Image (spheres, rainbow, N blue to C red):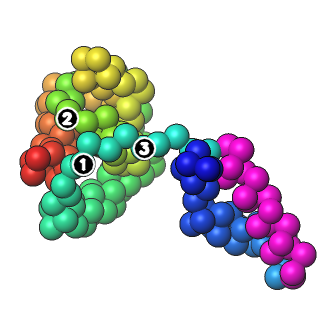
């Protein structure tokens, strides 16, 4: 019975049931019952793995500040990439760089990777977990200053993640 309790999550069942009804396009008793049975089967037969948690304390004020700044940076980066695409000059020189990521928690490393990849202009192409290193592709690396700016951006992201998730242990 303990194994079933660990696998069965009513919240997931309710969410999947609602999604099933949305996919069917109409709310009927048959769709709701079928969605419930199907979602129960999915949750019990295909359980999600446990998310590794190290009981980090989240600094909510810094997280909110990060999100606001991240959205602003998203707008700026989108404008820069659009300008690089629309200008009449040749495409910029790009680069593949290896940069350290000194976050100690794999979940925090994952969140940092998502935050970086969602910004236009660069992406993480490989993660070396053992050495805590990213391999990143940088769109605009035409000068040593541009490369230095991108490395500083990664270092700043790293500091922000540490301040938000790892500084209150």
Along the line of sight, which residue is nearer the eye, 139 or 128? 128
Which numbered circle lies on residue 51? 3
Q: Say which residue appears at 73% left-offset and 59% top-offset.
A: 39
Q: Is residue 159 magenta?
A: no
Please tell me in which quadrant of the rendered image residue 65 appears.
bottom left
Q: Secondary structure at mark 3?
A: loop
Q: Secondary structure at mark 2?
A: loop
Between the C-alphas of marks 3 and 2, the distance is: 17 Å
Mark 3, Cα crowd under 10 Å, few <14 / some 14-19 / many 20+, is: few
Q: Disc 2 marks which residue?
A: 103
Determine the main secondary structure of the stretch shown in magenta.
Answer: helix
Q: Which residues are magenta?
A: 28-46
Of labels 3 and 2, the one closer to you:
3
Asked if labels 2 and 3 touch by Cβ distance under 8 angstroms, the answer is: no
Does residue 6 appear left or right of residue 150 in this picture? Answer: right
Along the line of sight, which residue is nearer the eye, 123 or 48? 48
Of labels 2 and 1, the one closer to you:
1
Q: Disc 1 marks which residue?
A: 55
């Amino acid at each position: 019975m303990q194994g079933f309790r660990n696998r069965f999550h009513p919240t997931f069942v309710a969410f999947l049931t609602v999604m099933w009804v949305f996919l069917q396009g109409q709310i009927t008793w048959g769709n709701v019952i079928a969605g419930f049975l199907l979602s129960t089967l999915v949750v019990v037969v295909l359980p999600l793995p446990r998310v590794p948690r190290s009981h980090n304390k989240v600094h909510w004020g810094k997280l909110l500040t990060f999100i606001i700044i991240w959205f602003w940076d998203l707008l700026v980066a989108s404008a820069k990439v659009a300008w690089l695409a629309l200008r009449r000059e040749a495409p910029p020189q790009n680069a593949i760089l290896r940069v350290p990521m000194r976050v100690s928690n794999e979940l925090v490393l994952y969140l940092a990777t998502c935050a970086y990849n969602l910004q236009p202009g660069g992406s993480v192409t490989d993660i070396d977990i053992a050495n805590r290193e990213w391999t990143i592709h940088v769109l605009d690396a035409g000068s040593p200053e541009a490369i230095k700016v991108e490395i500083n951006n990664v270092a700043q992201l790293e500091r922000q993640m540490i301040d938000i998730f790892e500084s209150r242990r």
